[in-house]
């Protein structure tokens, strides 16, 4: 069996909270606390949850933009956790990123061709002519005309800028693309075009995506596996069809019940959760969701539910799910 393109095992990020003149560490914020998943070649795993649940921190750790406090990151089955910059270089090109904000992530002083070709300048020894030919092909792959290479980023629309970001991410022929809310800054009409482009590229190149989103409609469109996060932990993970047809964790149920249905006449039971996500600096004891869960029982206040595999293969962390 082929190794997962990307796997994380028991990944943790605990930020120290420091106080006083001597900056003594008085506590830790457990932004990510033991997250595990694997993404096979050609598949998309979506991390969903409200803002502050730790999903972007997982994405940054997968890219080695921030170092984990514990756990492991594996690319093509090779443990790359803690590799020095030089040793990491061959792996660096295997995993690339598409940013959330296509307005902020592209250098306004560079031409679009230069932006897309920059990774090739850094990693390959191509002549200018070969590099320009490759960049022109990348433009075509993402649905942009190659003659747009001489224009500047501000001359493109939001959707076109995100296409530039995708072309840049593709330049080094990665196996994995980490996309953190890549369509949330775009108009709804443009979102679908960019999602369809990502899906077409996945099919053509066998790409794996780690896709971070708060938008259930978006993940239903693009995901194969959905991992729902709450306060730094995965509370339910399952294939998309399973999770949307029959969510089991109360938090997953609430998120899905609030997502718009494709048919506006259709109705589904709404499960409303009260209040905001508690501070990860001071998470509730027991099940971290008990302060907002409409089904909480006494046990939930004292005992943390483990993420357990259920008979249908999904994993859920809830005392009430058999
Ligand atoms: Fe709700 Fe209890 Fe399940 Fe947590 S363990 S999700 S509080 S029912």
Image: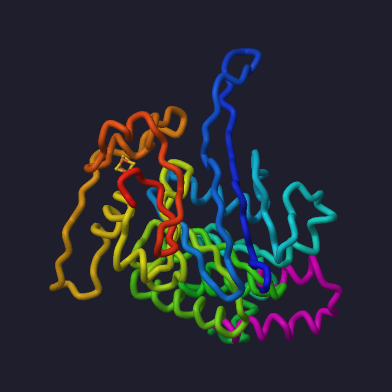
**Residue at left offset 54%, top offset 48%:** 35
Numbered range of the magenta stretch: 115-142
**Residue at left offset 33%, top offset 35%:** 300
Assess whether residue 302 is covered by the magenta stretch: no
**Residue at left offset 65%, top offset 41%:** 70
Residue 155 visible in this rendered orientation of the protein: no
Looking at the rendering, which quadrant does residue 219 occupy? bottom left
Nearest to the observer: residue 63 or residue 293: 293
Q: Is the image coloured rainbow, by chain, by secondary structure, or in one colour?
A: rainbow
Q: Position of residue 193 (x, y in %)?
A: 42, 78
**What kind of secondary structure does the magenta stretch mostly adopt?**
helix
Q: Position of residue 53 (x, y in %)?
A: 44, 45
Nearest to the observer: residue 218 or residue 320: 320
Q: Position of residue 104 (x, y in %)?
A: 54, 57
In which quadrant will I find the N terminus? bottom right
Q: Position of residue 166 (x, y in %)?
A: 58, 72
Looking at the rendering, which quadrant does residue 309 occupy? bottom left
Relative to 13, 213 lies left or right: left
């Amino acid at each position: 069996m082929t190794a997962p393109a990307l796997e994380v095992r028991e990944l943790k990020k605990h930020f120290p909270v420091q106080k006083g003149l001597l900056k003594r560490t008085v506590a830790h914020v457990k932004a990510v606390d033991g997250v595990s998943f694997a993404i096979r070649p050609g598949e998309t795993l979506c991390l969903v949850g409200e803002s502050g649940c730790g999903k972007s921190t997982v994405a940054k750790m997968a890219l080695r933009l921030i170092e984990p406090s514990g756990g492991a990151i594996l690319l093509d089955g090779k443990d790359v956790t803690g590799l020095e910059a030089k040793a990491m270089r061959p792996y660096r090109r295997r995993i690339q990123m598409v940013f959330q904000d296509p307005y902020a992530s592209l250098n306004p002083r560079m031409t679009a061709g230069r932006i897309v070709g920059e990774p090739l300048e850094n990693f390959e020894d191509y002549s200018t002519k070969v590099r320009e030919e490759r960049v022109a092909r990348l433009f075509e792959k993402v649905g942009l005309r190659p003659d747009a290479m001489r224009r500047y980023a501000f001359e493109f629309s939001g959707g076109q800028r995100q296409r530039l970001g995708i072309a840049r991410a593709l330049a080094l022929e990665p196996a994995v693309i980490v996309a953190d809310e890549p369509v949330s800054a775009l108009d709804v009409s443009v979102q679908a075009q960019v999602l369809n482009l990502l899906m077409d590229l996945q099919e053509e190149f066998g790409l794996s995506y780690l896709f971070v989103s708060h938008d259930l409609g978006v993940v239903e469109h693009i995901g194969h596996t959905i991992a729902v996060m709450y306060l730094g932990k995965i509370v339910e993970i399952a294939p998309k069809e399973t999770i949307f047809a029959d969510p089991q964790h109360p938090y997953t149920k609430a998120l899905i019940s609030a997502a718009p249905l494709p048919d506006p006449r259709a109705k589904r039971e709404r499960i409303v959760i009260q209040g905001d996500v508690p501070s990860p600096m001071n998470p509730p004891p027991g099940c971290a969701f008990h302060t907002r869960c409409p089904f909480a029982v006494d046990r939930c206040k004292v005992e943390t539910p483990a993420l357990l595999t259920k008979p249908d293969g999904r994993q859920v962390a809830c005392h009430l799910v058999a």
